[in-house]
Amino acid sequence: MELPAPPPPPATPAPERVARWREVFAIIGIAAGFAVLLTIPGWYGIRAWRRYKRGEGELTGWTVWGIFATAFIVLSIILGAFLGSPDTESAAEPTTGTDSGISPGLTVPSVSPSPSPKESKNPAVVKNMFNKLLGWSTGEELSFGVFWLRFPDDDCDVHTYRLRGRPRGAFLSGCASWEPEYDILLFRLGFKNTSKHPVTLILRNLVLTDRSGNTYAPVNVRSHAKFPPYFLNERQKLPPKGKWSGWVTFDGRVVSLVPASLSYIDSEQTLVQVFAGKPNVVQASG
């Protein structure tokens, strides 16, 4: 029995359908096109997909783009898993800021060791050298500094410290305008509130330490000053980001007192300005 002849081939052969995995990557490539260039490539991809479904085109370019997009996503996930988790056993190094508005002193913090990983990251003690240029003792809420004083002064003796350079005036004594009724040492200080809430400055939080280790509390002569606002009050509010500068006084009747540091102590931190170098006294010129 003779077999019938096969039917003639169609005039226009239908395009070969791509494998299923290529369609998957093409869909991913089209979706990724919406993430770049204002989504324009994505809309072109949808048009190509519709032509492909009608048998009028191929998806080779979108398949390749989908493979690259998939590789990028997988690589991002892997890198995120390895690099995204910080080492919880390593503590960040505490830092302190600098500001040119207040005195002397490069930031050289002295950090007390933390007994527990749960302790605050801020150091308990922040020290700066009074003699250095552009320095603050900067804590969690406050920056604290001692201004350099010009010398000679017409009214007062100026006590200076020299450390590898020019001497810097640190405080005044023997002021003719105050003596003989008041024998005081005058330091010009500055504070800056670095927090977002008000801070109360407390005069009794200041402590002067001499080179023998003795400590001294400030004395309040504000009510006897010609310009009282220039002297720190017993308690004084400092608004967020606010600054204050003025005078603080100590008893000047202590014989041969050579200050080693001036500290501001609050409930969280101690901010210290260190008086290093060779001391000297420049007599009043008036």
Image (tube, rainbow, N blue to C red):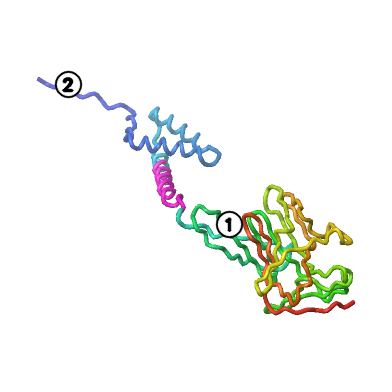
**In this image, 252 relative to 116: left or right?**
right
**In this figure, which residue is indicated by the disc labeled 2?**
4
In the rendered image, is residue 261 in sight? no
Which residue type carries mark 2? Pro
Within 10 Å of the Cα at label 2, are there few (<14), some (14-19), or many (20+) other Cα atoms? few
Q: Is residue 111 left or right of residue 26?
A: right
**69 part of magenta stretch:** yes
Q: Amino acid at mark 1?
A: Asn
Residue 255 vs 220, above or below: the answer is below
Distance of label 1 from label 2 (alpha carbons): 94 Å
Residue 153: image quadrant is bottom right
Which residue: 67% across, 62% down? 98
* Residue depicted at x 89% and y 61%: 226
Q: Residue at the left extreme? A: 1
Picture coordinates of residue 8 (x, y %)?
A: 25, 25
Name the residue that disc number 1 marks. 122
What is the magenta range? 66-86
Among the 4 quarters of the image, the one containing residue 22 = top left
Tell me which residue sits at (83%, 76%) in the image: 152
Give the overall secondary structure of the magenta segment. Answer: helix
Residue at horizontal 81%, vertical 69%?
184
Q: Are marks 1 and 2 in contact (CB under 8 Å)?
A: no
Residue 196: x percent and y percent? Answer: 68, 48
Q: Quadrant of the N terminus?
A: top left
Find out whether residue 74 is within the magenta segment: yes
Mark 1 lies on a secondary structure that is loop
194 with respect to 115 (left or right)? right
